[in-house]
Image: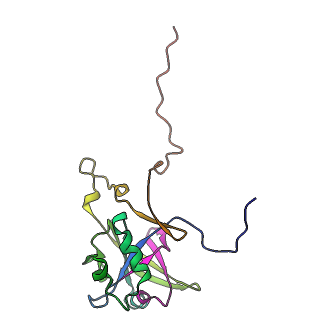
Amino acid sequence: MRESWKPGTLVYPLPAVLVSCGATPEERNLLTVAWTGTVCTDPPMCYISVRPERHSYGIIRRTGEFVINLTTRRMARATDWCGVRSGRDYDKFRETGLTPIEARFVAAPLVEESPVHIECRVKQILPLGSHDLFLAEVVGIEVDPAYIDPETGRFRLDRAGLLAYAHGAYYELGERLGTFGWSVRKRPSVGRRKKH
């Protein structure tokens, strides 16, 4: 028989991302976020949910911009560290060894070590309770060309070793089980045997 728990947030796994913010080098900061996702394709929009007491909250609210940087196995320690230390007390780029680089469309920096950078402009802030949701329009995407297959030209993000977060722990995404729509695609027909 299943156990009944009080209502909570058990939608897992989630992406573990580094959100970068700050309009000047002096205020640049990194925030680890797992409560993030896509909400619309046209226009492209996503969200992050942040506690108002977090140092990055005020920066994002004031500048109206942030970057979602996907993380990898190699970035796991830095991703966790940025989630438990405050930008009030540390220069997170310096402490983690991550590299800030200039974004194309927003003032917030990109994290060079990330395979994908999603540049965002805040459209709306929704107070929800413990967290406020920053609803944002995606204004630019930057990708690491190391994950472009030179033979096919396809973006092979599956080779990045992306991080996921589930119930207090980090995991590396693993084996691919199928691609979108694979469950309904027709299988190639196998030649029928001729009757003798």
Residue 18 occupies quadrant: bottom left
Q: What residue span does the magenta drawing correspond to? A: 30-57
Answer whether residue 184 is visible to the viewer in this image. yes
Q: What predominant SS class does the magenta segment belong to?
A: strand
Q: Position of residue 36 (x, y in %)?
A: 48, 73
Q: Position of residue 171 (x, y in %)?
A: 46, 63
Q: Nearer the viewer, residue 187 or 2?
A: 2
Q: Position of residue 21 (x, y in %)?
A: 35, 83
* Residue 76 highlighted magenta (yes or no): no
Task: Please report the residue visible at 42 percent of the width from the left and 89 percent of the height from the top.
Answer: 55
Say if 18 sits above or below 161 in the image. below
Residue with the most extreme right position: 1
Task: Please report the residue visible at 58 percent of the width from the left and 67 percent of the height from the top.
Answer: 11
* Residue 42 highlighted magenta (yes or no): yes
Task: Please report the residue visible at 47 percent of the width from the left and 77 percent of the height from the top.
Answer: 48
Quadrant holding the N terminus:
bottom right
Position of residue 131 in the picture relative to residue 97 (left or right): right
